[in-house]
């Protein structure tokens, strides 16, 4: 069991074990869940395909974040998760990997309460106490602020859901700054353009009927 736990920590939480590499190359991107942050989607898909795992979703949201979800994971567990639906989610922004997550669902509330305690214990032993904890509507989350990474454990036993989310902070920050710059640089709507789009003007909308 001890050997299995060490293997799990090495594969799931590699940052601390790669500290020596980071000292030699402080600009190197960290990795989590078997994927190095900043890699292209095509590179990630080659890894998924090589492991024979099935992609179940490949989509883009309104903020141009591409999400790839595949069945299973590239990591091992020191406890039984065979009765749960295990998936890995990868999120790419600007064609680079920005976030990787473990998604576990199914089972019952007791299973997810135990899973939450197992994961929380592993993360505390690896990184110490979380930076902060949140609770809302029976959903609890714990956040660790790591060098270059934000790590979140999200637990909702009532919804039969447990998530571990790694976010690459440099890329996430760049995304937020880009979206902000785009927002403040967008000119206000042209009233004439709005007239042709909506077929009305503020004056005509407020005018009494019959005028």
Image: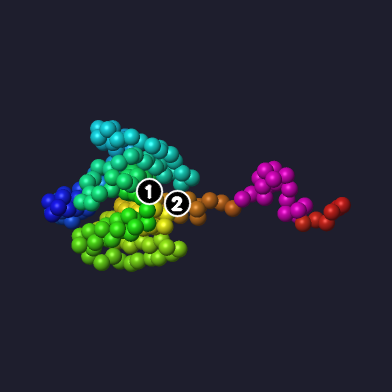
Left or right for 209, reference 13: right
**Label of residue 7 in the image:** none
Residue at x-position 30% and y-position 35%: 53
- Is residue 200 highlighted in magenta? yes
Q: Position of residue 138 (x, y in %)?
A: 42, 63
**Callout 2 crowding tier (Cα within 10 Å): few <14, some 14–19, many ≥20:** few
The span shown in magenta is: 189-205
Position of residue 172 relative to residue 127, above or below, is: above
Residue at the location (53% across, 51% down)?
Answer: 186
**Depth check, front residue: 3 or 33:** 3
Please give the name of the residue rendered at 43% of the width and 39% of the height, measured from the top-left corner. Answer: 59
Q: What percent of the width, then of the height, locates residue 104?
A: 34, 49
First along the sequence among labels 2 and 1 = 1
Residue 126 higher or lower than 65, as above or below:
below
Is residue 70 something one can see in this rendering? Answer: yes
Total labels: the figure holds 2
Does residue 32 show up?
no
- Furthest-right residue in this view: 210
Q: Which residue is rendered at x = 56% and y = 51% of the image?
A: 187
Q: Residues within 10 Å of mark 1 (few under 14, many from 20)?
A: some
User: Closest to the observer: 167 or 51?
Assistant: 51
Q: Nearer the viewer, residue 160 or 155?
A: 160
| Residue 54: x %, y % from top left | 33, 34
Element carrying mark 1: loop
Pointer 1 residue: 106
CA separation in Å, label 2 and label 1: 36 Å
- Report which residue position mark 2 lands on: 179
């Amino acid at each position: 069991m001890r050997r299995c736990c060490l293997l799990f920590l090495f594969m799931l939480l590699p940052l601390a074990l790669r500290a020596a590499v980071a000292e030699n190359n402080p600009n190197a991107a960290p990795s989590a869940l078997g994927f190095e942050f900043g890699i292209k989607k095509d590179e990630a898909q080659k890894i998924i395909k090589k492991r024979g795992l099935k992609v179940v979703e490949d989509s883009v949201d309104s903020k141009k974040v591409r999400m790839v979800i595949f069945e299973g994971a590239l990591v091992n567990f020191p406890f039984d998760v065979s009765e749960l639906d295990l998936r890995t989610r990868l999120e790419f922004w600007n064609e680079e990997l920005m976030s990787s997550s473990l998604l576990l669902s199914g089972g019952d509330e007791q299973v997810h309460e135990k899973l939450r305690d197992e994961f929380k214990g592993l993360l505390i032993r690896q990184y110490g106490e979380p930076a902060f904890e949140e609770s809302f509507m029976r959903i609890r989350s714990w956040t660790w602020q790591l060098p270059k990474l934000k790590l979140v454990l999200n637990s909702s036993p009532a919804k039969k859901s447990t998530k571990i989310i790694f976010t690459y902070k440099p890329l996430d920050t760049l995304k937020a700054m880009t979206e902000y710059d785009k927002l403040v640089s967008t000119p206000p709507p042209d009233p004439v353009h709005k007239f042709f789009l909506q077929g009305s003007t503020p004056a005509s909308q407020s005018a009494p009927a019959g005028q």
